[in-house]
Image (cartoon, coloured by chain):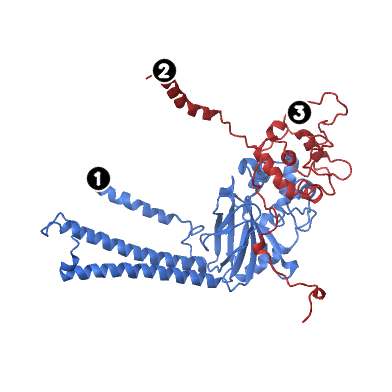
Amino acid sequence: MSSRSSASLLLIVAFPLAVSACDREEHHSRAKPVGETVPSGESPQTIFPGSSSPPPLDVRAKLYDNNANAISQGQQLYMQMNCVGCHSHGGGGMGPPLMDDEWRYGSRIDQIATTIAEGRPNGMPAWRGKLTEDQIWDLAAYVRSMSGLPSKDAVSSRAEEMSGPTPQTLTPKPEPTNSDAVPSQ
Amino acid sequence: MKPRAAIPAALAPLLLGGCSYQHYQSIFGAAAVEDRQFLSLFWFFLGVCVLMYVLVIAFLVLGIARRGRTADANVVETGRHHTSDPAMRSTLIGWTALIGIGLAGLAIASFVTDRSMAEAATGEKLAVTITGNQWWWDIVYNSADASKTLRTANELHLPADVPTRIYLKSNDVIHSFWVPSLAGKQDLIPGRDNDITIVPKKVGIYRGQCAEFCGVQHAKMNLVVVVEPYPDFIKWWEHNLQPAPAPTTPLTLAGYNYVTTGPCSSCHNVGGTPASGQIAPDLTHLASRKSLAAGSMPMSKGNLYGWIGDPQSLKPGSKMPTIGLEPDQLHAVVAYLETLK
């Protein structure tokens, strides 16, 4: 056997070892133990004016940013907590759109989490105390995904929730109530 | 293994048949018309198949015993049946006819059972809507009178001898409604209407189970089904329509304040209080139910403490978050929830 073919044989045998490098994404179903959460009323200062150097990213960001589970949980909460009522499905309405590239209070996940937790002027309510910190960060992860900021392998192509109306094959046929519009026989 | 030991060993699996806990969750429960129809079909199929199997084995044994009696002993199939003796010919014709009759019998029995099950679906007296969620059952008793419409969760009460139509919906992924003692499976499909009709016959408590893999806590998506006489059922319905009792002690008042203003109220509804979330199980009469967290554990004070204190360690991945309550808050919340009889 030539040295070249034995080298390629070694490569083939060693190839499965590369699979061990495929790190499974961590699934954080449990929030931090009691006592490690940020005390209520104390929020990170995430907004700084001017071009001074921004504060370091919150340590929790790496648990939620680009995390598929956090994004899909956040997507369910986005509907359930009626974010849709003002922001629509990202297109905005009474509230600003979330799927564009304009971020009044910052596009970093910790900045978005602070916006959700503490609220913002002109209508955004504070969710601290109404949602857990874990849920707020899940929502922030999803909000970021609406403008395509997380990597594509973390976002889901199919939501674990109902979206859109019932299929048209199931749409009931009501009798028209406005009889004026129908020519009478 | 000695032959003498082999016989009990071969028969041992039959003992497993005795392991059904009073038909709590068993297809042999026969607690409803649907399951009885299914069971009679099952026994008919079993009888026909056992008869045919025994006949095949008997003729095989006979054939082996009679080998060597014919001249061309090593020929398996001569292809000269028309020349074989009349006894052999009529046996073969009879055997073929038996197979035809058996298969036709199975087909007819299956068709008739299917038809009669479909007919049972027409005589509806009570309508219940069950919506599957990850990982619990939302149950609504529909009534033309809106004030009588009852919403509860994870515990289905059915009146005996009353045909109940259960409308099945899903809020997220496909689930499947399966109470083996009462009826077969029926899927809950998001965006589609599905239903199943059950006529319970035997009073008792049964267990249902989601029968379609629906996510990490699929195994802990259970349903308690209580079949009770009609007057008891109406009493239960009337009782559950009542709003939650007002807190009477300082401790339960503190719990009431936390539940109605804290994160609980974002998802849970407690009838007659400001807590009106609609995306999690209704808590109005939580303490009167037999189980907690969709049949994951029995209802008890200790389990309430465990479940509310750290749900993610008991049911990891469930939508109930670990809130991180302080001990005095936890005492108050459990004390309040225990009053929700």
Which residue does the image show at 44% across and 22% down from the upper left?
A10
Give the number of the mark in front: 2 or 3: 2
Residue B106, located in which quarter of the rendered image?
Answer: bottom left
Label 2, secondary structure: give it. Answer: helix
Q: Is residue B132 left or right of residue A16?
A: right
Label 3, secondary structure: give it. Answer: loop
Q: Front-most of A61 and B218?
A: A61
Residue matched to label 3: A57
Q: Front-most of A80 and A133?
A: A80
Residue matched to label 1: B2
Mark 1: few, some, or many residues within 10 Å (few <14, many ≥20)? few
Mark 3: few, some, or many residues within 10 Å (few <14, many ≥20)? few
Which residue does the image show at 88% across and 29% down from the upper left?
A49
Q: Are marks 3 and 1 on the same chain?
A: no
Task: Give the chain letter for red.
Answer: A
The quarter of the picture where the C terminus of chain B appears is: bottom right
The quarter of the picture where the N terminus of chain B appears is: top left
Chain on which label 2 sits: A
Kindly identify which numbered label has been placed on residue A3: 2
Say which label, 2 or 3, has the lower sequence index.
2
Whether pointer 3 and pointer 1 mark residues with C-beta atoms closer than 8 Å, the reply is: no
Q: Position of residue A8 (x, y in %)?
A: 45, 23
Q: Position of residue A141 (x, y in %)?
A: 72, 38
Q: Position of residue B41 (x, y in %)?
A: 43, 67
Q: Residue furthest top?
A: A3
Give the number of the mark in front: 3 or 1: 3
Q: Colour of chain B?
A: blue
